[in-house]
Amino acid sequence: MYELIQVSEHDHYIDCPSRMGIVKTRGNEVVMIDSGNDASAAKKALRVIKENGWELKAVYNTHSHADHIGGNRYLQENTGCRIFANGKECDFIRHPEMEPHMLYGGYPAEELLNKFFMAKPSQAEQITDDVLPEGWSVIPLPGHSEDQVGFITPDKTAYIGDALASEETLSKYAISYTFDIGSCLSTIEKLKETDASCFVPSHAAHQYDIAPLCEVNTRVMLEVAERIRGMLIEPCTHDELMKKVFDAYEISMSIPQFCLIGTTVRSYVLWMREKGIADCTIRDNRILWQNTADRKAEEL
């Protein structure tokens, strides 16, 4: 754990639960891509950097989830490095209390007020062309998070954050947090066309051919969508649908899981509504969801 893995002449990552990219830029200077889940992870990463005689200049965050930005504050305070992120992700990094607010949909339950959902704030700056290392490019990867991005280095290594899950994770959990199903599926398709020699997901082994992992992610997401569609044969409220999902995937209910899976289920049914395969009606002051094929059959 926390072993430095080299994937090209200049590109590395630290092998840990939420992988941190380490890229040599010039001389002994390096930048990081994501900073791990907390100060302890960042401290271990910084030790690896110093052991190699490198100097940390900046952290580039793929997105604002706590397990990717948890070390920002420690690194900024101990090295003076700059922190960069894209769009709304930058705002969430500066104001991490917004994450539990968003997940709960209001003043958050205390079960969400911990380091797993809310990292310590750091002074993040917007990513612009003039703050990128020479030869880098940014690729938008929305879906898992609204303004998630990836980074492609001059060695053609693509650090892609949480754009893809590992086969092991998909096999174990199948349904996991996704902010926007449609954007996530489009991002996966885009990754298959991305010109890179190596891909480094945050929670999967690095890949030289990304297409197989893309196919598995797409297949599982569409299987989840079809399973949810099957749960909507009869009209049901969101809470009723949530119970069906939790029972089907053998998930134990808790407030954090209710928020994470609840957001994902809402994303699925809204995507299905956009596709015309599900819709909602308001009846007796309840929003009822149903797949459109069965609703049309009922109406005939």
Image: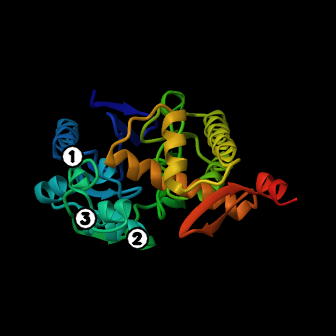
Residue that carries the numbered disc 2 in the rendered image: 88
Image spot of residue 299 (x, y percent):
83, 60
Number of other residues with Cα within 10 Å of mark 1, as a class: few under 14, some 14 to 19, many 20 or more:
many
N-terminal label among 3 and 1: 1
> Residue drawn at (61%, 35%), measured in percent from left and top?
213
Q: Is residue 290 above or below residue 217?
A: below
Image spot of residue 83 (x, y percent):
28, 63
> Residue drawn at (61%, 69%), measured in percent from left and top?
282
C-alpha separation, residue under disc 3 versus residue under disc 2:
13 Å
Q: In which quarter of the image is residue 16?
A: top left
Q: Is residue 212 above or below residue 176?
A: above
* 236 horizontally vs 300: left or right: left
Q: Which of marks 3 and 2 is in front?
A: 3
Image spot of residue 69 (x, y percent):
29, 54
Q: In which quarter of the image is residue 9?
A: top left
Quarter of the rendering occupied by the N terminus:
top left
Residue that carries the numbered disc 1 in the rendered image: 38
Residue that carries the numbered disc 3 in the rendered image: 97
Circles 1 and 2: CB atoms closer than 8 Å: no
> Residue drawn at (55%, 34%), measured in percent from left and top?
248
User: Tag 1: residue type?
Assistant: Asp
